[in-house]
């Protein structure tokens, strides 16, 4: 899965089917199951001190959030391959190999894509992550900078960038 600037999310057919099946489950059987858990916990008595009730309500909230996320994602999804970057620059949907601080012995190869695609065998970084946003738009051979969690800057060299063919 990749995202482009038009806010379109590109999905493989397999990823689309998997996310659609998850949405159907969460919207149907999972809602019924959580409603039954809440009802059973409610019957146990005092709701202020009922851990099972509060846990079930929290689970319901997380489930409903995921339903909204999946609905929005699938509404904006296109099935197929994202168009390749016209100028050969790093873009979402690419497998990128970088060298940290220009040291070609200290490398990392990752898929630049959304987390829903993380079921792949390759490590996945979001285009919105510090590293992901730092390498987007750079070409092979160029240096890129991104901000570390401690606020310092780190530099990487783009060694390779190819469209993902998973």
Image (cartoon, rainbow, N blue to C red):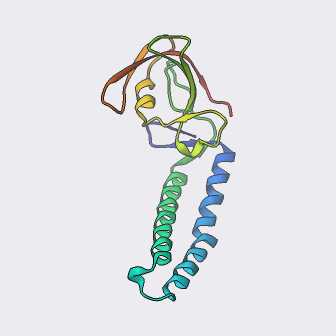
| Count of numbered marks | 0
Quadrant for the N terminus, please: top right
Does residue 142 lie above or below 48 as drawn?
above
Q: Residue furthest front?
A: 49
Q: Position of residue 158 (x, y in %)?
A: 50, 16
The C terminus: image quadrant: top right
Residue at (67% x, 36% y) in the render: 121
- Seen from the viewer's position, the closer of residues 96 and 78 is 96
Q: Residue furthest left?
A: 151
Which residue is located at x 40 percent, y 32 percent? 130
The answer to which quarter of the image holds residue 95 is top right
- Looking at the image, residue 62 sits to the left or right of residue 23; the answer is left
Q: Residue at x 52, y 54 (%)?
A: 75
153 or 20: nearer the eye? 153
* The image quarter in which residue 79 lies: top right
Task: Please provide percent x and percent y for residue 12.
Answer: 65, 42
Q: Is 21 drawn above or below residue 104 in the view shown?
A: below
Residue 86 percent across, percent down from the top left: 51, 22
Q: Can you give x and y, in whole percent of width and height, for residue 74 in the image?
A: 55, 53
Instruction: Please tell me which residue is depicted at 67% across the width and 30% down the height of the picture.
Output: 165
36 sits left or right of 157 in the view: right
């Amino acid at each position: 899965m990749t995202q482009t600037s038009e806010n379109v999310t590109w999905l493989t057919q397999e990823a689309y089917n998997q996310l659609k099946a998850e949405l159907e489950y969460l919207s149907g059987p999972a809602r019924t199951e959580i409603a039954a858990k809440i009802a059973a916990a409610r019957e146990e008595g005092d709701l202020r001190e009922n851990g099972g009730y509060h846990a079930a309500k929290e689970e319901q909230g997380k489930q409903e959030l995921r339903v909204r996320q999946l609905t929005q994602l699938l509404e904006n999804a296109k099935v197929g391959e994202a168009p390749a970057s016209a100028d050969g620059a790093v873009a979402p949907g690419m497998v990128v190999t970088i060298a940290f601080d220009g040291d070609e012995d200290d490398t990392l190869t990752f898929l630049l894509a959304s987390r829903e695609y993380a079921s792949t065998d390759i490590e996945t970084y979001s285009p919105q992550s510090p590293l992901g946003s730092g390498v987007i738009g750079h070409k092979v051979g160029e240096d890129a900078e991104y901000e570390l969690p401690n606020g310092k800057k780190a530099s990487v060299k783009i060694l390779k960038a190819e469209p993902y063919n998973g």
